[in-house]
Image: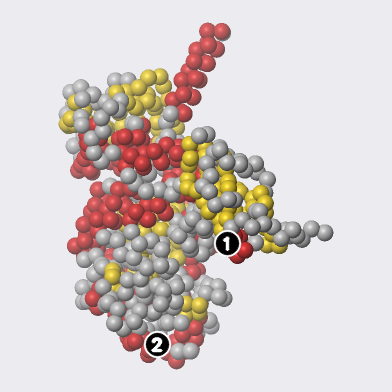
Amino acid sequence: MKRLALAAGIFSCLFSFGQNNIAIIPAPVSMVAGAGNFTLPRNIIIEAPFDAGLKQVTAVLKERLSVPTGNKVTMGKANATIRLALTGDAKMGKEGYALSVTTKNITIKANQPAGLFYGVQTLLQLFPKEIESAKLVSGVKWTAPVVEINDSPRFGWRGLMFDVARHFFTKAEVKQFIDDMVRYKYNLLHLHLTDDEGWRIEIKGLPKLTEVGAWNVKKTGYFGTFSPPAADEPKDYGGFYTQDDIREIVQYAKERFVNILPEIDVPGHSLAAVASYPELSCTPAANTYRVRSGEVIMDWSRGAPPIALVDNTLCPANEKVYDFLDKVMTQVAQLFPFEYIHVGGDECPKNFWEKNDQIKALMVRENLKSMEEVQSYFEKRLEKIVESKGKKFLGWDEILEGGLAPSAAVMSWRGVKGGIEAAKMKHEVVMSPTTYAYLDYMQGDVVMEPRIYASLRLKKTYEFDPLPEGVDKQYIKGGQANLWSEQIYNMRHAQYMLWPRAFAIAESVWSPKEKKNWNNFFSRVEKHFERYDVAEKKYAPSVYEPAFSISKGADSLYHIALNKEVDAVDLYYSFDNSFPDRFYPKYTDKPITMPKDAVNLRVASYIGNRQVGRIVTMPVAEMQARTRVVVKK
């Protein structure tokens, strides 16, 4: 018995050691670490069955193994280093895989090429961080730990939305976005192709959509606060995808097992279309409208839906609108093989409709009692158009208002309430709530982040569960995160906003719910920060930085509590305008008091003797803006 206990103890230590040195995101279903390591030979041989779907799988594996290592990679069977095998294990499903790493070789098995592709992504995460390098790296031991992994996704819909309408991103940048997302087993790219700021897809027979609708005046600063463009300012900022571009992007995604969901956002968010074809509007003044550059066009003081200062809607009472949408949907359906078309439906202002005689006549004719029913009339007609093209109809949860189109699917963004309601009505649902999944939100304190109207920190994002309690899982297709681009002008900043929060969403939609653990997850995130440093990809260090809770007491002094996401972080601070390091006063989880004449508080974050995050400066002016007065009796 002692021998057995000793053997069990040794195995337990080996298992713990192996697990601690493995940092896979998203966490696999099952992982058993063994003793020892596999070492890549100078001549790497990959064995794979002949299958058209495996072409890109082997291409990715060959490139990722050869570029940083300098090793030779060839295809063959004899003495194979890495073996890819298609099998027939029902437990794996369409996207699952089994990965076995021994001291001698590596085997990945799956039912479908997609599973092998995801197995390859996991395998690459087992090698040293330098495997992420885009150039040759010397002096690295190219080893992977011995491990047995069995894995498959929790949900079939694992999405990221990329808003290319507010700011245009090139075809090459969209491909880069796809390459980044598939490393974390995302399989759905939602392209937001149209909005007030741009129409980004060529539609044959409607040339003004891209001649006019794809271009605006470039502005820099805070979106939504820009001055209205002057008549003499050039409208040369933007761009669009030709239909050949779309075909190329779709094929690129397909080879990486990604479906692309196109979104044509109507009837609101349609100023680019209206500026191109004013006859689509209910409002005569539409012939003076231009594509938005980020100036104020809505009054949000009363909440949603907003009060429109400019009518950015298509007119539900105008038959030309349905002819227009038929042309658009015909071509969109032909370009995108995915089974759904997203039609938007969100944040549609109705104040211009309320005053319009055409809308009033429509309400009488169709016995519509409210503006919500007017939009529902529009959605139901659009659903018939979309279905006539052989596609399924999907919209944001506002399409529930006024009555849901018969077979519509709902993407729930205003929390999970709309998704729960739709699921109970037996409609398909994708969960994408602002509460957890809006990656354009600030991820740290407002004094450090590009300012936007809400915040969402990494730890909160990690709490996302696409399947609420009490909801029939057969109606929840999965979940996705959304990257709206009002404040995102380039790909480097897009990366900053995505990562690490997109790691959290990836784990929420792939990994078993019971596997989720914040401390374990963040320990793996830190390893992926190191990999991103090697890859020279941008990410946000905001998780290391404090959130400030500020109050002003009866003593008229500011009292500041520093809240942490990561327990291991130590916070050091200064009030004397100098830049703190770990030799400065340490925050002890009790509010600190701002000296009477100090002008700012600076905070540095450390783990041990290593600075993490950035030095955060909190000025007195910002404290004044956010304080609440506490009066002690």
Q: Quadrant of residue 271?
A: bottom left
Give the position of the N terminus as an image quadrant: top right
CA distance for labels 2 and 1:
42 Å
Q: Amino acid at mark 2?
A: Thr
- Reply above or below: 82 against 166: above
Residue 171 against residue 156 in the figure, above or below: below
At 24% across and 61% down in the image, what residue appears? 246
Q: Amino acid at mark 1?
A: Glu
Q: What x and y, as percent, mark residue 123?
A: 33, 33
The one nearer the camera, 328 or 245, is 245
Please state which of residues 595 and 250 is positioned toward the viewer in this rendering.
Answer: 595
**Residue at which label 1 appears:** 622
* Residue at the image position 27 percent from the left and 53 percent from the top: 175
User: What residue do we see at 34% from left, 77% from top?
Assistant: 291
Q: Is residue 90 above or below residue 233?
A: above
- Residue 362 at x, y percent in the picture: 44, 87
Q: Which residue is mark 2?
A: 283
Foreground of the two, 189 or 368: 189
For this view, does 224 lie left or right of residue 188? right
The residue at the far right in this view is 633
Residue neighbourhood size for the residue with mark 2, other residues' Cα within 10 Å, grouped as few (<14), some (14–19), many (≥20): many
